[in-house]
Image (spheres, rainbow, N blue to C red):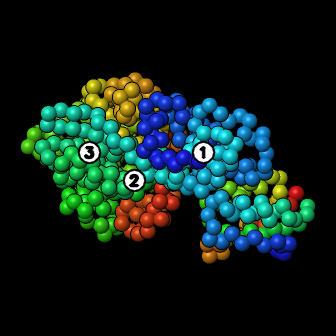
Amino acid sequence: MNANLVVDAKGLSCPMPIVKAKKGMDTLESGQIMMLETTDKGSVNDFQGWVKQTGHELLNVQEDNGVFRFFVKKS
Amino acid sequence: MAVKELRAQELHDRINAGHSVFILDVRNPDDYNDWKIEGGKLQSVNIPYFDFLDDNEDLYQNLPKDTEIVVICAKGGSALMVGELLDERGFDVSYLVEGMLEWSQFYHPVTIAEETDMKLVQFNRLAKGCLSYMVISQGEALIVDPGRHVSEYLEYAKSENVTIKHILDSHLHADHISGGPELAAKTNATYYISSGEMQDSGMPFEPLERHEHIQFGTVDVKVMPISTPGHTPGSTSFLINERFLLSGDTIFVGGLGRPDLGGKAREWAQSLYDTVFSTLAGLGDDVLVLPTHFADIQEINANGYVGAQLGDIRRNNEIMRTTDREQFTEQVAGGVGATPPNYTDIVEINRGTLQVDLEKATELEIGPNRCAIKHS
């Protein structure tokens, strides 16, 4: 899946992954895709809650060796 | 102004003293609804921290200006962020430094009975709904169902100037990691658990079923294991001085233990029936039942501990009077909800067949207790 923007939040803990995701999202146009990478397991549920709250669309979640990758389409 | 730091002990002291405490929990709604801080005159609202990123001033409208707001999240970071936003807007604000992580590891000791030659203390791990006990007599102590934060017991024993001699697990716990083996190793005390619970375990333990009485101290403090299968095949209850029944996960203040965690719900429900209507039938209504768990903060009684007289439990729980075996089995085996999180891993750790580091242990234990069946 191709992303218009990759946000690296690896090694950061709560709330930074979502803070960075929000900042990244603000730079995108509607319909564009952001990929966020995080190693913070606790942010997985939060991320889903945030996407739901903001009305963006969560396209895909992948886990690879402790790194979570979220693909989100801007509303 | 600055955001004040608050620790679990202080927060609990305020709740326990009946002060009005206003909690702003900034975790996501799923986590909040699953597991939150409750009790006393506590008021709690949930606004996830990510909502605060949107510069939406409406969020602050309904928060109180005249009382301190305690901000809480999973580990502290997000609560501090939200705390600073509130502080900038002139709110009186503090945050729980390590969040629910810290709350999940907080223990509160309450004295249940204190007599010349015997003291019985309940350790309430509030966030988990886990209860453990220390019985003290003549300079020696016996501990039942200790949690893995063994320093809680070591420090208490030190402050009482007593030596820990016996450590008992009423059963192989599925919801939290036992502190029994570690505590035994640190104190040279004997660690007892039923052999039925420890199949394939390489861990050293003294089989509970070999003891009808465990006596300690120079006074006659009798500890009598009563085999009460039902919750797990080797569950044991302890009757102390014929007056206090440490019931493990068999009988709770609000009902019975769940029989389904071994995959043989109906079979175990049958032996739970025998436990209630045969083994425990001979005990008087005035015996004080002290379980290993509670399901609801309401179970903490006016004296500050979780416990109830057997007679009250019999009166208040229909299941305790359901003498029809079929009906009983149906109700018990059918009435169970979600299983405790990570229970298969936790059982293996407690059996000694799985080793984990501290971080993993903490992660496995996060979340509410789900060992009791809530009977309406």
Q: Residue B134, labelled with which disc?
A: 3
Q: Which residue is mark 2?
A: B173
Q: In percent of the image, x 33 and y 38: which residue is there?
A: B110
Q: Earlier in the sequence, mark 2 or mark 1?
A: 1
To the question of a shared chain for discs 1 and 3, the answer is yes
Disc 3 and disc 2: Cα gap in Å?
Answer: 18 Å
Spot the residue most to the front: B1
- Please indicate whether residue B216 sits to the left or right of residue B250 in the image: left
Q: Chain of mark 3?
A: B
- Please indicate whether residue B220 sits to the left or right of residue B253 in the image: left
Q: Which residue is mark 1?
A: B1
- Please indicate whether residue B38 sits to the left or right of residue A14 in the image: left
Say whether residue B12 is visible. yes
Neighbour tally class for label 2: few under 14, some 14-19, many 20 plus, Cα within 10 Å: many
Residue B269 locus on image (x, y percent) = 43, 43
Q: Amino acid type of disc 1? A: Met
Q: Residue B269, labelled with which disc?
A: none
Q: Amino acid type of disc 3? A: Met
Please state, as top left, top right, bottom left or bottom right, where the N terminus of chain B lies in the image: top right
Q: Mark 2: which secondary structure? A: loop
Residue A9 locus on image (x, y percent) = 69, 69
Res B205 quadrant in image: bottom left
Q: In percent of the image, x 29 and y 34: which residue is there?
A: B112
